[in-house]
Structures are given as C-alpha cells and as structure tokens.
Amino acid sequence: MIEIKGLHKYFGDLHVLKGIDLNVAKGEVLSVIGSSGSGKSTLLYCINGLEEIQKGAVIVDGVDVHAKGTDVNKLRQNLGMVFQQWNSFPHLTALENVALAPQIVKKHSKTDALEIAAKQLKHVGLGDKLNVYPNSLSGGQQQRLAIARALAMEPEYMLFDEATSALDPELVGEVLETMRMLAEEGMTMICVTHEMGFARDVSDRVAYFHQGIMEEIGPPEQIFGEAQSEHTRKFLANVR
Amino acid sequence: MSNNMSFFSGFQPHDLLFMAEAAGQTLLISVLSISTGTVFGIIFGWMLQSGNWVVRAILGTVLDVFRSVPLLIQLVLFFNFFPIMGWPLEPFAAGTFVLSLYTASLVAQVARGGIEAVGKPMRRAARSLGMSYWQDMRYVVWPIGLRAVFPAWVGVALGVMKDSALVSVLGYVELLRASQILITRTQEPFIILAVAGAFYFVLSYPLSKYSQKLEERWAS
Ligand SMILES: Nc1ncnc2c1ncn2[C@@H]1O[C@H](COP(=O)(O)OP(=O)(O)OP(=O)(O)O)[C@@H](O)[C@H]1O
Ligand SMILES: [Mg+2]
C-alpha cells in the first residue's frame, strides 16, 4: 500500500504540492488528472523519492520513502516508473535495455537477466524486436520497451507519468492497451494521464489535481458523472 | 651527433633514425600527457558538472586560466618556477606536467559536455530502475556521453600531440627540436620539415582512423 500523508513540496518559493493525503491499495488503479502545472508529475517523483519533500510523508509497504536510513535504490525496484519521454538507452538493444537493471541492480546472472528481459518484451508485444536498437523502434514501441524495462524489476507498483502524451496519435492505442493489460493482471498503478477514456474505463478511482491540491477523488462514475468540484467540471468540460 | 662528418652536410640516412627516435619522444610525451590529462579532465569535468557552486567557480576559473594562457608561456613559467621552489625538473617532466594540465583543462570541458549530453530525464529513468548514482554513471551516462563527445576528445588529443612540439623550447629533443637541429646542420629545411610532417601524420593517423571506426560502429 502507498500512503501519502500531508505531503508538501516546494521548488524554492513555489509551493507545488499543498498537503496531499492519499492512499492507494494493492491492486488498485488510480488515474490522476488535472491541468498542466498542477503537480501531478511531482507527486509521482515524490512517491519514488526522485524528489525530496518538505513536509509530510510517503510510506510504501510500511517504509518511509524520505526517511534518512531508507535505501531508495532498493525501494525503487518495487516502484516501476514510465515517463512521458521513453528514455530508451540508445547504446543498447531492446533486450539489453531491459536486461541491464536486473543484471546490475538485482545481480542476476547475465543469462537470467536476458531471459527475464526476453519474457517481458514478449509480454508487451515486442518479442520480434529483441535485438533491435531503440532508434529503429517507433515511439509506441519504445514506450512499451520502457514498460518492459520497468516490469523486469518485478515491481509491485507502477507509476505512469503521461506515458502516451509524447506519442503520435496513431501510436497511443498500443501503449494504452499494454497499460490496460497490466491493470487486468492486477498491477497496482498510479497513472497520470490526459486520456480520459482510459481514466474512465480502466481506473478504480480518479483523482483531480488543481494547483497543488487534490481537489477531488472518487470512482470514475463520480468524477466524470457528478463531479462535486467546480474546477473538476470545468477541467473536464475543456478536455472533452 | 658526434660523428666524423663535416658540420654542414646533407641529410643522411641515419638522420632519419635520429628523427624516428625524436618522434618516439613526441609519442611518449603525448601519450603520457593525454592519458594523465584525460583521467584528471574527466574527474574535473564531473566536478564542474555536479559540484556545488564553490567548486564550480574555483575549478572553472583555474581551468579557464590553463585553457587560455598560451601553452608556450605556461611551459616556460613552470620550467623556471619549479627550480625556484627548490625542485628542479627535467624538461621532459616539466613538459609532461604542463601538457597534462593543459589537456586536463580541455578534457574537463569535453567531459562536462558529455555528462550534460545525457539529459536529466534519462538519468531519472535509470535511477527509477533502482540504479545507484554510480551505476547510472557507469552504465548509462558514461556510454552515452562518451559517444556524444568522443570526436571532441579526439580533437583535443590530436591537438595536444601537435602542441607537444612546444616542449622543444625547454630543450627537450622531440620531433620539432630534432628537425631544427638537423636543419641547422644540413641547411635542408624542406626535406626535413617534410619528413617531420610525415612523422606527425604517422603518429596521428592511427588515432583518427581508430576513432573513425569506432564512430561508424556506434552509429549503426
Ligand atoms: N525541478 C523543478 N524546479 C522548479 N520548478 C519545477 C520543477 N519541476 C516542476 N516545477 C514546477 O512545479 C509545478 C508542477 O510541475 P509538475 O511537472 O508536477 O506539473 P504537472 O501537473 O505534471 O504538469 P504537466 O501536465 O504539464 O506535466 C510547475 O509549476 C512546474 O513549473
Ligand atoms: Mg507532468
């Protein structure tokens, strides 16, 4: 379980997250929506410790992410993350991209790491691209590669930061399909997204962020049907 | 050159050997300076990129001095400075020291550029997989950054090899100094300078060829 308690985040004087309280249970799929600059990406970075926090706490399976003695490198193995930019390692083949972290972080033997990598690449539908370099993959394929790379660490949680926003429209579908598949397999997911269809159909809950505040959270039917907050309704009216 | 020929005589076959030996000295001082300078340059470049502002300001200024003061002046200054400190240095040692520093100051900028060529998003992606800072450096930043700035480093290395000729002002007999000695004796500057040029080319060619090969391999 991910527990976020009274989380405040500043960039200098800029107050980006203003007291977030949020729990995400095992197996849950949470979509996070909201306008640009509302702090959605920052929230994800605070969850896996890529950003420091100024107040509050993030606790993953009982471990305080930002506590002094916490081994964030160990923790992050359990918190896969996929970014807007796919960030494939350009000097490695698809297989090597996925095998790298299992080998050097998890200390698997090279053979085992490659085996894990091949399995994950097949899982996301890239079984025929094992020995291809990223520059000859499409954006959608590279994003699925990024998903496979995260999955190869066998995380219990996956964080998606607008995984489809940088893709050409015709490539969005394949990535959403992969994310949907993970959701159906029971992966715990927090998905920052602008894809309202995905948020509505796949998530258990949807959270709306507005200027650093989690303004509203609830099941998709509530958020998309009878949003309580004026801001939520306005935002949804604009994106549709 | 103690031989029984007259002081002024034409270019002899064994002069070629003399020049080859001198080319060996050029190679030696270049390889030493480039490798030492590269190691320190990478460390300095990393400090420039990731140090706090005090480190960046001080180191940046010092390296700027070494990059911008003409090498000739640095060589003469250091060569005369060490004896004053009660630590006289051979021309070879002084030359290697100054050339290494000079190389390091150039490589520092190249190395910093290499690290910066790997953007923050890429590094965050690496860290998000559980890699430590040094694993990210070793397995992501190094290979990607190296490919980005390798041509620039080759440029620095070839430049330093040519600049090593300046060590001749300290009296160190490398290729240029050897040529001057022979020119004085033979009065045949054209032949000798052409031969010296050919030696410099022979010294540089393997590196440029090898780097070309590497770049081709990386590009595929
Ligand atoms: N490293 C940083 N330094 C300073 N300010 C930052 C930094 N990262 C983000 N910010 C600021 O924090 C605020 C929240 O940014 P964040 O990226 O979390 O928003 P977002 O909701 O993800 O927006 P988007 O939909 O555009 O991705 C923005 O005002 C942004 O400019
Ligand atoms: Mg964002």
Image (cartoon, rainbow, N blue to C red):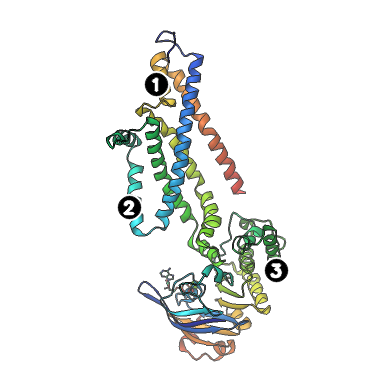
Task: Answer with left or right where residue A113 lies relative to residue B127.
Answer: right
Vertical placement of residue A201 versus B50, above or below: below
Quarter that holds the C terminus of chain A:
bottom right
Vertical placement of residue B110 versus B2, above or below: below
Chain hosting mark 2: B
Q: Specify few, some or many for label 1: CA neighbours under 10 Å numbering under 14, 14-19, or 20 or more.
A: some
Q: Specify few, some or many for label 3: CA neighbours under 10 Å numbering under 14, 14-19, or 20 or more.
A: some
Q: Position of residue A82 (x, y in %)?
A: 57, 69
Task: Answer with left or right where residue B144 lies relative to residue B46.
Answer: right
Disc sitting over residue B58 in the figure: 2
- Residue type for callout 1: Gln
- What residue is disc 3 on? A123
* Mark 1 or 3, closer to the camera: 1
Chain hosting mark 3: A
Q: Nearer the viewer, residue B76 or A237?
A: B76
- Residue type for callout 2: Ile
Vertical placement of residue A187 versus B147, above or below: below
